[in-house]
Amino acid sequence: MTCPSCGEKGILDILYDYDEIHKTLTKEKLKQNTDNSMWRYRDLMPVADDTDVSGFLRIGWTPLYESKSLRDELGIRKLYVKDDGLNPTASLKDRASGVAVAKAIELGYDTIACSSTGNAASSCAGSAARMGLKAVIFVPERAPEGKVAQLMIFGAKVVSVHGDYKATFDLSKAAIAKYGWYNRNAGINPVMTEGKKTVALEIAEQLNFEPTDWVACSVGDGCTIGGVYNGFYDLYKLGLIDRIPKILGVQSTGCCPFVDAANAGRDLVPTEENTIADSIAVGVPRNPKKALRAVRDSKGAWIAVTDEQILDTMRVLGRHEGVFGEPAGVTATAGVREAVARGIIRPDETVTAISTGSGLKDVRNALKAAGKPKLCEPDLDALEASGILG
């Protein structure tokens, strides 16, 4: 599954015959397509034509909201928020897991496995349960309870690993090799990126194939941002868009190996995983080449934000736009706010921020961001005296 020369630092690209695909994937045919899921783009996925996906969870075609108040606060021309927290298990990772389960079925596997900080795990377990596969999931012990609860409800065999994400990944890799399960690890299996890229395909189609100047994405392993670039690249090669938007890669200052490497002009080095944004707390990214390519070739930028900025953006995105994102989910929007403040994103430019996961995934940090409600006696005088109503 990986490059024989580069090893795990060189996750393979899947190549497509764009001339052939252009015969079946056109703007006109997409307008006529009534499949409001990621499978509307099946021509650009590495899944055999005879693999039946009709019974899968409905993944994709999540809303793209145009901001008004937050856009005005930032002082930019347009801002859109792509809310992928509305996928079946509440994160963008459903896109990758849907393709993984389809591929596992196609190849005759009965068990699928991966390591994850939470979202990839729950998405894998949910899609596997739906399609009758067994799932074995390895999570670091710090994984939020909401995500672990999903795993248990979906009936996965859950291995809570005493250690960080690297230790979790290494154990999953060894177990998968020993027991012969299908490998859903995004840092190894190239089909994961092909599922994730559908978020970019949707953004483009929802904007009538005129994507914004910038698309912002939170970054952990580097697989999602790599997929976002791949999606826009595919559309560009098919002639459906006339340019690839600049991609803003956003990390937390508590775990930002890509940002540190970009700022220092050096290769990535392992870093601490010290951030509330658990889904992007990856000190040793498994897909560095594709992530770096996404920002470099799109002429984008890297930026890091603090956990305090992430918590503040959870509040702002909820109160201004009605989008409830987990810490990693709102990190892209936090990065947009910081990039505007630094002048990286100009006032005359347009932006799409991808919200990758629901705030219900991590209620503890949501309450840290928003605060807890005041207790009031069941009496109108007490209500008025409480100050709750302002």
Image: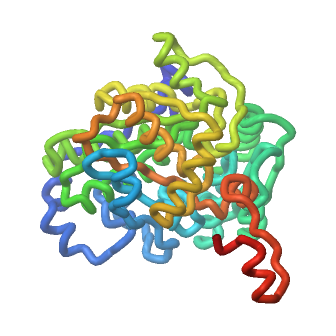
Q: Residue at x 15, y 54 (%)?
A: 22
What kind of colouring is applied to the model shown? Answer: rainbow
Q: Residue at x 62, y 58 (%)?
A: 124
Of all residues, the one furthest to the bottom in this rendering is 379
Q: Residue at x 39, y 63 (%)?
A: 38
Q: Quadrant of residue 341?
A: top left
**How many numbered marks, from 0 up?**
0
Q: Is residue 51 above or below residue 203?
A: below
Is residue 92 visible to us here?
A: no
Horizontal and vertical percent position of residue 237: 19, 42
In the displayed structure image, the side of residue 290 where residue 309 appears, left or right: right
Classify the position of the C terminus by image quarter. Answer: bottom right
Horizontal and vertical percent position of residue 43: 29, 58
Q: Is residue 188 above or below residue 134?
A: above
Q: Quadrant of residue 13?
A: top left
Q: Residue at x 69, y 46 (%)?
A: 117
Nearer-the-camera pick, 349 or 209: 349
Horizontal and vertical percent position of residue 85: 53, 62
Horizontal and vertical percent position of residue 77: 25, 48
Is residue 88 visible to us here?
A: yes
Q: Is residue 157 above or below residue 117?
A: below
